[in-house]
């Protein structure tokens, strides 16, 4: 066997006094210190920049915005919170916006789970190694490719004389579309200006995030358990319902963290496609951008943080973190 | 494997018959079609002769828009800025993510879970939260918005990508190799250079490329951390979406971006695959 010329062939003397060796020996003996040194920089970055920013946001949510001068008064008060949740003059009322956004996030999450599960299941249970690789790539490519371009694609699809209309006309399904658009609350003038359109785009953009955790959870279900179940006389559907589904559920929850959170905090999709009525992200964007009401923007951002904290703690209970 | 004495009683076709596999195939195919159809549409529309509407099917096909788009300097400026931002963010994320993965992998103390949560938080919390938080902090300390602020934001949520890739590789590394290297007299640094680094190299490359792709594509946070004259490619595309007259150019740019982002993804995929087999 030939030796790699870059690797020192002779052992360095054990009592070498070169400074590098001294540091190395010291680190080896104090392994906790070495670990601490490794973590120092990344933790410093995350704590100072990220947690620090969250803290700054929290502090700003207690400032007051003077509507007449357009200035932010930097003194502690609950005014912005009061304004956010009780001011009846706001249009649309913030409470409605929060409700609408959470409802959309829940709908997108459920639909994504339903759409993603069969795909993840097929990948984990039936696909051969080659097929599995292809399917995996089939999910990864849309997940990682440009988000904005994929949103734009739906503008082309949902437009009045666009792709969707053409297909529905060919299939004779236009009455179904008209009926859907007539439904109060989710309909609108056309697909591209209705909640159905916004929902479809959210679903499309975030669905891949659901597939991978479910797939990972399904891969971990031991084959012996499903075999035992069928040996004991359970039919495939029963095995699926009582063995596979409960064991892979943490994967669904893990995926739902992404679909839910991403829908909650997105302001791009509702601005490109959809109705004029606000979603939470868009509301924050206007308060910050055009109005300059920083305290209110901060309060409205604290809302999704609180929602996500609750969501994450429930997800942790359900074992989702092990499935991430 | 445990022997199954009653196996002969089982219908061997029970897994293969029934509705479920066919239903499953159809559902899988439908989900994949849903994921990929819009991308084909983007490619198709780059060649349409129709300038004003989104008419489908396109009345004719042409390649002239590629030439028109090629001459747009603002597009190339935005692309250059995005590449610079993505390279800087991926670089920072590579260093911090690798250090963090190594530290968490070595440590056995209770704070481990807290650290992994802290790393995930920037992408687990809604994008608008990270955006507003960073903007609040930058406002508080009166830092000027520009290239640096964009990179700080991007690096923060890119750390997790590198971290995930590297720590997965560490978990598959035999710890005995590192111990053997140290026992044979290699210093901590030599062990890192000659044992650890070759082992995690492809994970680093894959993580770095995915971090690049994530940063290259980011808009939710960038909108809040960029200065007024800092137009990254996603911001450029976003403003294009509200310029109906530029539609053909937007279509071409969209195809270009899709093509460019596919490359690092495919490479990263190949590298992680090869390492696993």
Image (cartoon, coloured by chain):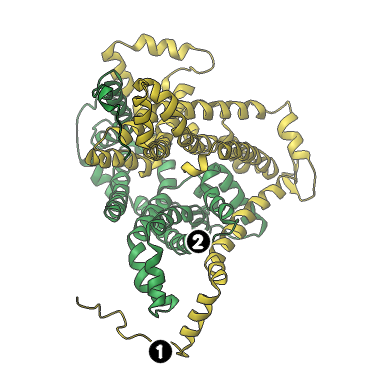
Chain colours: A yellow, B green
Q: Which residue is mark 2?
A: B100
Residue closest to the eye, A106 or A53: A106
Q: Which mark is residue A13?
A: 1
Q: Are marks 2 and 1 on the same chain?
A: no
Q: How many marks?
A: 2
Q: Is residue A61 above or below residue A211?
A: below
- Camera-nearest label, 2 or 1: 1
Residue B167, x across and y down, in percent: 43, 56
Q: Which mark is residue B110?
A: none
Residue A282 visible in the shown view: yes
Residue found 66% across the figure and 28% down from its top: A95
Q: Secondary structure at mark 2?
A: helix
| Side of B132 where B215 appears, left or right | left
Q: CA distance from mark 2 to mark 1?
A: 32 Å
Q: Chain of mark 1?
A: A
Dot 2, crowdedness within 10 Å: few (<14), some or many (≥20)? Answer: many
Residue found 38% across the figure and 72% down from its top: B180
Residue closest to the eye, A310 or A172: A310
| Side of A214 where B34 appears, left or right | left
Q: Secondary structure at mark 1?
A: loop
Residue closest to the eye, B57 or B117: B117
Residue found 50% across the figure and 80% down from its top: A25
Q: Chain of mark 2?
A: B
Q: Is residue A249 above or below residue B78?
A: above
Quarter of the image holding residue B198? bottom left
Quarter of the image holding residue A171? top left
> Which of the image's four quarters has the N terminus of chain B?
top left
Residue B80 visible in the shown view: no
């Amino acid at each position: 066997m030939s030796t790699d010329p870059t690797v020192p062939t002779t052992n360095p003397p054990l009592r070498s006094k070169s400074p590098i060796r001294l540091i190395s020996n010291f680190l080896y003996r104090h392994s906790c210190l070495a670990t601490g040194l490794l973590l120092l920089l990344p933790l410093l970055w995350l704590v100072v920049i990220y947690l620090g920013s969250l803290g700054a946001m929290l502090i700003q949510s207690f400032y007051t915005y003077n509507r007449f001068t357009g200035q932010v008064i930097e003194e502690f008060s609950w005014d912005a919170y009061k304004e956010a949740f009780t001011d009846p003059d706001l249009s649309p009322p913030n409470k409605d916006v929060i409700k609408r956004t959470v409802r959309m996030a829940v709908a997108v999450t459920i639909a994504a789970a339903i759409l993603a599960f069969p795909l993840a299941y097929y990948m984990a249970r039936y696909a051969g190694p080659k097929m599995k690789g292809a399917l995996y790539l089939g999910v990864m490519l849309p997940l990682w490719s440009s988000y904005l371009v994929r949103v734009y694609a739906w503008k082309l699809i949902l437009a009045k004389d666009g792709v969707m209309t053409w297909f529905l006309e060919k299939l004779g399904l236009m009455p179904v579309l008209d009926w859907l658009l007539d439904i109060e609350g989710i309909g609108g003038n056309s697909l591209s200006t209705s909640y159905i359109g916004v929902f479809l785009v959210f679903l499309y953009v975030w669905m891949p995030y659901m597939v991978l955790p479910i797939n990972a959870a399904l891969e971990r279900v031991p084959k012996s358990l499903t075999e035992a179940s069928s040996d004991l006389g359970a039919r495939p559907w029963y095995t699926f319902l009582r063995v596979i589904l409960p064991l892979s559920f943490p994967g669904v929850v893990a995926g739902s963290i992404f679909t839910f959170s991403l829908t909650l905090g997105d302001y791009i999709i509702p601005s490109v496609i959809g109705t004029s009525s606000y979603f939470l992200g868009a509301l924050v964007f206007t308060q910050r951008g055009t109005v300059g009401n920083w305290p209110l923007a901060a309060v409205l951002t604290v809302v999704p943080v609180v929602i996500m904290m609750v969501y994450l703690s429930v997800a942790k209970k359900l074992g989702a973190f092990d499935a991430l | 494997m445990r022997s199954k004495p009653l196996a002969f009683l089982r219908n061997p076709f029970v897994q293969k018959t029934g509705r479920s596999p066919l239903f499953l195939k159809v559902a899988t195919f439908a989900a994949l079609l849903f994921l990929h159809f819009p991308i084909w549409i983007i490619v198709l529309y780059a060649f349409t002769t129709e300038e004003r509407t989104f008419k489908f099917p396109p009345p004719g096909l042409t390649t002239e828009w590629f030439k028109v788009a090629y001459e747009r300097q603002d597009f190339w400026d935005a692309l250059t800025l995005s590449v610079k931002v993505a390279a800087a963010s991926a670089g920072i994320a590579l260093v911090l993510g690798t250090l963090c993965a190594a530290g968490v992998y070595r440590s056995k103390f209770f704070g481990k879970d807290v650290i992994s949560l802290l790393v995930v938080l920037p992408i687990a919390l809604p994008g608008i939260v990270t955006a507003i938080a960073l903007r609040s902090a930058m406002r508080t300390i009166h830092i000027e918005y520009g290239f640096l602020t964009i990179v700080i934001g991007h690096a923060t949520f890119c750390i997790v990508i590198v971290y995930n890739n590297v720590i997965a590789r560490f978990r598959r590394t035999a710890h005995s190799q590192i111990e053997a290297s140290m026992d044979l007299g290699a210093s901590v640094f030599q062990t890192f250079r000659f044992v650890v680094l070759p082992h995690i190299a492809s994970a680093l490359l894959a993580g770095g490329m995915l971090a690049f792709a994530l940063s290259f594509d980011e808009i939710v946070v960038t909108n809040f951390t960029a200065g007024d004259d800092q137009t990254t490619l996603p911001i450029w595309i976003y403003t294009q979406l509200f310029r109906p007259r530029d539609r053909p150019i937007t279509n071409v740019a969209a195809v270009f971006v899709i093509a460019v982002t596919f490359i690092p993804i495919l490479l990263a995929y190949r590298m992680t695959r090869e390492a696993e087999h």
